[in-house]
Amino acid sequence: MNDITTTMKLNHLSFPSSDVSATATFFEEHLGCTVAGRGTSWFLKRPGFDIVIDDAAAHPVKWPHNFHIGFELPSLDEVCALYGKMSAAGVAMKTDVFKHERGSRFFCEVPGGVLVEINTRADADEHYRGTFDL
């Protein structure tokens, strides 16, 4: 990193969806986003960054199999609780909660096709713990 990039922070994520309303509703209902604007693009707020969902109904979106957006929770209990809430709400779950060397996680699919990872670093293997807050 250099002097300029050390002060840089994530400003926003922007991605297309074939169903903007359903995608935005998912982020609002399941991930705590606040809808700040509706139109052909929807603007959602999160602490520290925004999410912009663009209308791609005229151009089908094909996501690479491993493209995803990740959100982190402080504990495995919270990851499991959110997994349970999303499952009960009929969210398209792609995995169960599973242990990974960088922390437990699960994957689900948002309406519109984008993959979301929910993880915790609380149970990450010891040799990864020092790499998280660089």
Image (cartoon, rainbow, N blue to C red):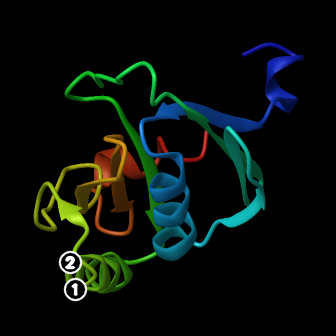
Count of number-bearing discs? 2
User: What percent of the width, then of the height, locates residue 37?
Assistant: 79, 54
Can you name the residue that lies furthest to the top here?
2
- Viewer-proximal residue among 29 and 128: 29
The residue pinned by badge 2 equals: 87
Q: Residue 88 carries which label?
A: 1
- Viewer-proximal residue among 19 and 62: 19
Residue name at image x 53 percent, y 55 percent: 21
Amino acid type at image mark 2: Ser
Q: In this view, does 48 lie to the left or right of 84?
A: right
Residue neighbourhood size for the residue with mark 2, other residues' Cα within 10 Å, grouped as few (<14), some (14–19), many (≥20):
some
- Viewer-proximal residue among 78 and 31: 31
- Viewer-proximal residue among 49 and 17: 17
Where 80 falls versus 66 (above or below)?
below
Q: Is residue 61 left or right of residue 45?
A: left
Q: In this view, does 117 lie to the left or right of 98?
A: right
Q: What element carries label 1?
A: helix
Q: Distance between the residues labelled 1 and 2?
A: 4 Å
